[in-house]
Image (cartoon, rainbow, N blue to C red):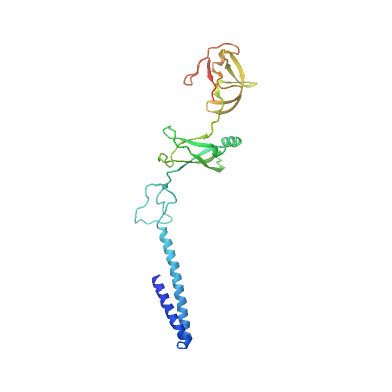
């Protein structure tokens, strides 16, 4: 570039001397044309060298790799001095530490139920259970729901963003995911063992305040583990028999006892709780 600029300065000076001489007739028109041509060539040479310099600077910038995000790197694959190219293996793995993303599949039947109830991603929190069984102290939020379902599992992939300031979460770590509503949803739940079915539908054997057995027709809803939702027929605090149904009948008086550690007791009643 310096050589090209020096040539341009010389061509410009030659042209500037030749033109007034040619105007006075001291120098020939051919000499002026030659000086003008050399000046144009010198300018073109400078432009070419400028383009070459820009290309060299671009190539040089490729030798410095800048990470698009903050994170932590793993073990380097290559050492200083080794040759690398487009076909080489990755130089190093970079993992974002905070926040982290957790991906989990959701069955289509669950998504259908959520959509029918009008629940959106802004209304829920994502809570993690760590491998040691403890609950992760930071809740996350859903950021992405895939538009396609997996044919093999009939599930849709969901991704949530989780804060990780203490660096407890590690890339590729396996955790348990719970999606929790931000607002508490109170529902009446009873043990499935309390429900009896007949031709008319579902009912339970309830125990009145006088410890007398009576039939209560109920309307059940969604199942959650060993418990099931009761939409109609019972109120909070009602007592229902969860075992020993074959030993009782409506109208008799019983001596109910509360279950201990989910053990099934004879003539047992459990309290319906939200």
* Residue 59 shows in the view: yes
* Residue 31 shows in the view: no
Q: Considering depth in this image, is 184 or 154 the residue closer to the camera? A: 184
Determine the image quadrant of residue 80: bottom left
Q: For the point 61% across and 17% down, which residue is it?
A: 215
Q: For the point 51% across and 37% down, which residue is it?
A: 125
Which quadrant, please, contains the N terminus? bottom left
Q: Considering depth in this image, is 59 or 198 the residue closer to the camera? A: 59
Q: Against 199, is 28 above or below?
A: below
Q: For the point 42% across and 66% down, which residue is it?
A: 53
Q: Position of residue 183 (x, y in %)?
A: 54, 33
Which quadrant, please, contains the C terminus? top right
Q: Against 145, is 247 above or below?
A: above
Q: Position of residue 93 (x, y in %)?
A: 41, 48
Q: Position of residue 51 (x, y in %)?
A: 45, 67
Q: Against 71, is 28 above or below?
A: below
Q: Considering depth in this image, is 59 or 44 the residue closer to the camera? A: 44
Q: From this viewpoint, which residue is outermost toward the top?
A: 253
Q: For the point 55% across and 43% down, which residue is it?
A: 146
Q: Give the number of marks.
A: 0
Q: From this viewpoint, which residue is outermost toward the bottom?
A: 25
């Amino acid at each position: 570039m310096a050589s090209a600029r020096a040539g341009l300065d010389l061509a410009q000076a030659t042209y500037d001397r030749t033109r007034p001489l040619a105007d006075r007739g001291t120098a020939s028109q051919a000499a002026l044309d030659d000086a003008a041509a050399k000046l144009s060539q010198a300018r073109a040479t400078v432009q070419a060298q400028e383009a070459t310099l820009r290309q060299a600077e671009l190539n040089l910038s490729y030798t410095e790799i800048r990470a698009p995000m903050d994170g932590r790197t793993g073990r380097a694959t290559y050492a200083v001095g080794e040759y690398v190219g487009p076909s080489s293996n990755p130089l190093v793995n970079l993992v974002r530490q905070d926040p982290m993303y957790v991906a989990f599949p959701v069955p289509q039947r669950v998504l259908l139920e959520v959509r029918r109830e009008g629940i959106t991603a802004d209304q829920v929190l994502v809570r993690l259970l760590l491998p040691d069984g403890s609950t992760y102290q930071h809740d996350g939020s859903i950021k992405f729901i895939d538009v396609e379902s997996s044919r093999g599992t009939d599930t849709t992939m969901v991704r949530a963003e989780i804060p990780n300031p203490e660096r407890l979460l590690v890339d590729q770590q396996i955790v348990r995911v719970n999606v929790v509503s931000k607002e508490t949803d109170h529902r009446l739940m009873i043990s499935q063992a309390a429900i009896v079915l007949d031709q008319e539908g579902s009912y339970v054997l309830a125990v009145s305040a006088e410890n007398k057995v009576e039939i209560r027709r109920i309307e059940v809803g969604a199942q959650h583990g060993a418990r099931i939702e009761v939409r109609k027929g019972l109120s909070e605090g009602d007592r229902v028999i969860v075992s020993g149904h074959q030993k009782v009948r409506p109208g008799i008086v019983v001596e109910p006892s509360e279950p201990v550690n989910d053990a099934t007791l004879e003539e047992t009643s459990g309290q319906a709780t939200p």
